[in-house]
Image (cartoon, rainbow, N blue to C red):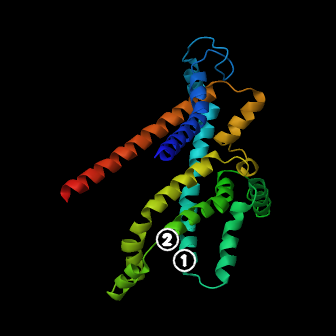
Amino acid sequence: MKSETIMRWGVRFYIGVFFLYLFTPLIIMGLATFNDSRFPTVSPWKGATLKWFAALAEDGAMWTALWTSIVVAAGVLVVAVPIGICCALFLSTVQGKGKTFIYSLMMSPLLTPGVIVGISTLIFWKGLSVSGGVFLTVVAQTTFIAAYVMLMVLARLQRFDRTLENAALSLGATQWQAFRRILLPYLKPAIISAAAIAFLQSFENYNTTLFVKGYDTTLTVYIASKVRTGLTPAVNALGLVMISVTILLAVAYEWKRRREIALSSSSN
């Protein structure tokens, strides 16, 4: 009994240290937003201020870069998710030794360094007279982000009971009807999670984007360029706003999920 108590408290201590390590930089970043200092730091503390939010509002280049990142991430979402789903469905039907080769081939962009993906994409499309920009950034990022989608959908698909689909087909349903009414609802949680991961992976990507962005600067590239010229706490203000929006969306989603569970329980 004593060993179980020690183990339980040890796990709690480890989790506490992990979350402290995880959230301390975010807390420091948030506090630096309110420090009246030219540099994003909390030491020395020069007094509380809200001027960096005003500086953020006036930084048109940063807002343009943020919008470009959102547009690119949305484009990657639209392209990578269907490709990842199709790859997962294809792999689930392949049998034999060729399956390992096809799986490795589809995973190869994910294992390739982002710098190589960016340079190779730029060289290939330059030969077709396509210069860097939003389009090329979407194409380059999709090559490896689609693999993330494929993995998440494939993991869900491996637990699917194929007899349900076969039963629907034997009762007269078409392949499309069986997919839309049976398989797609089952894959919905994995698809939503994969879409969120694809959006975030695109939004924070730097290595690949740097080579294919052209004149369309994304937020990560813009912040990296500001590191060389001098960051201001306006970047911290943007980070604090994004964290706040993320928390609000997570709370809203959790409230919606619990409400749906409560409604389904009351109806039963």
Q: Residue at label 1? A: 92
Residue 74 visible somewhere in the drawing: no
Q: Residue furthest top?
A: 47
Measure the C-alpha gap from mark 1 to mark 2: 7 Å
Residue found 37% across the figure and 77% down from its top: 177
Badge 1: how crowded within 10 Å, few (<14), some, or many (20+)? few
Q: Residue at label 2? A: 157
Q: Residue furthest front?
A: 1
Residue found 49% across the figure and 71% down from its top: 157
Tag 1–tag 2 contact (CB < 8 Å): yes
Q: Where is residue 128 shown, x and y percent of the image?
A: 76, 64
Between residue 231 and residue 262, name the one nearer to us.
Answer: 262
Establish if 53 lies above or below 163.
above
Q: Amino acid at mark 1?
A: Ser
Q: Which quadrant is the C terminus positioned in?
A: bottom left
Q: Where is residue 262 shown, x and y percent of the image?
A: 26, 51
Q: Where is residue 263 shown, x and y percent of the image?
A: 24, 52
Establish if 38 lies above or below 24.
above
In what element is the residue under mark 2?
A: helix
Between residue 122 and residue 258, name the one nearer to us.
Answer: 258
Residue 96 visible somewhere in the drawing: yes
